[in-house]
Image (spheres, rainbow, N blue to C red):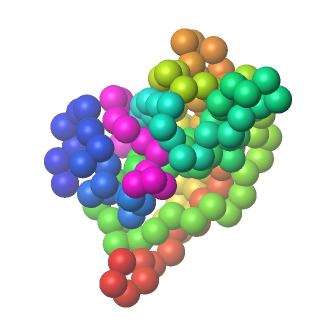
């Protein structure tokens, strides 16, 4: 697989099994094998999952933001040739903190860094920022399993 940056939506679809509306990464702009990855999520007004606050302002739910960080990390793991026939699964999230709301029109810059990487498990630290301000950060543990037949 060609990893010429930036990776666009079509390139990401070749790596991740997710499809619209569950694919939450629009672009990959930085990539260091087994170390670090940076992706972009453009939040638009027509996103199906936006929730509304008491004052009616639409916001990206923290659970969706967590999944976006996990997907960026999954791209880092699945880009390795030996992992292409595997699927990453959430094994746990730790010390995840939501710092501020994400609104339509925001460009979320998501960074994932490898803390520990083994053949079947790993730990990533993730952080997402809007305009340089952290909106979420935390650690995510994942396990690698086989792809089901037909996937």
Q: Position of residue 5 (x, y in %)?
A: 23, 33
Q: Quadrant of residue 37?
A: top left
Say how many tags the image has.
0
Image quadrant in which you'd find residue 134? top right
Quarter occupied by residue 122:
bottom right
Read off the magenta span: 20-38
- Residue 35 visible in the current orientation: no
Please identify the quadrant where the C terminus is shown.
bottom left
Q: Indicate the position of residue 76 as horizontal and vertical percent values.
A: 41, 47
Can residue 151 be found in the magenta stretch?
Answer: no
Compared to residue 95, the image places residue 58 above or below, namely above
Q: At which x and y percent is residue 24?
A: 47, 45
Q: Is residue 16 above or below residue 63?
A: below
Which residue occupies 61% across, 31% down?
Answer: 127
Q: Residue furthest bottom?
A: 149
User: Residue at point 37% right, 38% down?
Assistant: 26
- Is any atom of residue 18 visible in this view? yes
> In front: 28, or 100?
100
Q: Is residue 34 magenta?
A: yes
Instruction: Indicate whether 148 appears above or below 16.
Output: below
Residue 70 x, y percent position in the rendering: 56, 48
């Amino acid at each position: 697989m060609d990893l010429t940056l930036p990776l666009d939506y079509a390139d990401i679809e070749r790596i991740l099994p997710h499809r619209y509306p569950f694919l939450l990464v629009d672009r990959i702009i930085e990539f260091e094998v087994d170390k670090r990855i940076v992706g972009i999520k453009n939040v638009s007004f027509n996103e199906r999952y936006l929730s509304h606050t008491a004052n009616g302002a639409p916001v990206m739910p923290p659970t969706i933001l967590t999944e976006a960080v996990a997907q960026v990390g999954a791209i880092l793991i699945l880009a390795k040739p030996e992992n292409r026939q595997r699927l990453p699964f959430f094994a746990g999230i730790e010390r995840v903190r939501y710092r501020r709301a994400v609104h339509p029109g925001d460009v979320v810059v998501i960074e994932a860094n490898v803390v520990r990487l083994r053949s079947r498990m790993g730990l990533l630290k993730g952080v997402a920022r809007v305009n340089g301000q952290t909106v979420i950060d935390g650690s995510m543990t994942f396990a690698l399993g086989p792809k089901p037949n037909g996937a």
